[in-house]
Amino acid sequence: MSGQKLDERVQTGQPAIGWHDEREETTDAETVLELDGLTRRYGIETAVEDFSLSVGQGELLTLLGPSGCGKTTTLRMIAGLEQPSSGSIRIGGETVADGSTATPPEERDVGLVFQEFALFPHLTVGENITFGIDDWEQERQQERLAELLALVDLEEHEDKYPDALSGGQQQRVALARSLAPEPDILLLDEPFSNLDVRLRIDMRQEVRRILKEAGVTAISVTHDQEEALSISDRVAIMSDGHLEQVGKPELVFENPESRFVASFLGRASFLTGRVRGETVETELEQLETAQLNGPVDAYDGAQIDILVRPDDLEAVPATDGSADGEVVHRQYNGPNFVYGVELTDGTTLRCLHNHVEVFEHGQPVEVSITADHDLAWYPTEETDI
């Protein structure tokens, strides 16, 4: 992070973390979708406000956030199902909405995959897939159908009806149907929510494979962070109608620019420390400022909060005299335990341990920071520098 950007963050109270701003990250591919200042109001309520984002050719971007944050409204505005109150939408360089006029959904060259799949039960797999291209010449239509059946691995199911298919197969039919007209953009609304947990995990990579082989630009909406991180080229984190951060999954996860993003992605805990020159004194141990992911010079003498996730910490049994805290909660996940440890100052941290490392409720423990990566940090909310 440059000195100028650090100064700007300090003056505005933003966390001085990371070495670049993910908001400025763009794809090198040709831009297919541009959202500029997109806003949607319902009376006095604002669902989406001043949302700006670009998506490149062939990119898979996921809008991620809690229920009610505005991600589905954003998707519906891109599709043309809702009109923005202000701001503009450009697809393939053409303005399709600008707050006063809007191109109808059927003229936007956008495909939609709904969470319910919405297949026609009285049509076969082949008829469902070709439903949107029934005005094509028969030969071209059949060629496209053959391509798509091969792409979604359903060649042997062309003549079956939807009720004879599994949930995963139905999803692939819905995907193929949306891809049939060769849309500029494919929009997926919570595409895995109707699948059971095991199938959902398998289908994530299957859908990513299909989209990448098709070369289509896709925007997905989900509140499932694991899903978003596992399938996306980039994720855009939304909160209360605003874009919080956008970037590659690993960069957003490792360098969250706000407390909201840090808390939403992964099981975050915050360890308070006081900056003393080149060190930070915490309740657990003294850290070098070089272990943080951005300069803290401007906070010398002040408190900061350091983001630690369960895999950054390790607990070991301790006597009452040497303990940092005690176990107040444990969650068994099969391969591992996540323990909640309450420190003597009242802070609760989460520690990840192998399933054979068992601690009892109330057991005193020492906790150490074992992270082998730079740690994100934020000014303590009440800090005045």
Image (cartoon, grey):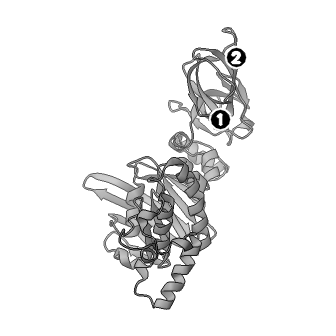
Q: Looking at the picture, how far across and down is residue 69, in whole percent?
A: 40, 50
The answer, for residue 247, to whether it is visible in the render is no
Q: Which residue is mark 1?
A: 335
Q: Nearer the viewer, mark 1 or mark 2?
A: 1
In the rendered image, which quarter is residue 36 located in?
Answer: bottom left
Q: Which residue is mark 2?
A: 317
Q: At 47% across and 62% down in the image, what residue appears?
A: 52
Q: Secondary structure at mark 2?
A: strand
First along the sequence among labels 1 and 2: 2
Q: How many marks?
A: 2
> Which circle marks residue 301 in the picture?
none
Which residue is at the front of the view, 348 or 143? 143
Kind of residue at badge 1: Pro
Q: Looking at the picture, how far across and down is residue 243, in whole percent?
A: 47, 54
Marks 1 and 2, how far apart in space? Answer: 20 Å
Kind of residue at badge 2: Pro
Q: At 58% across and 74% down in the image, what residue appears?
A: 150
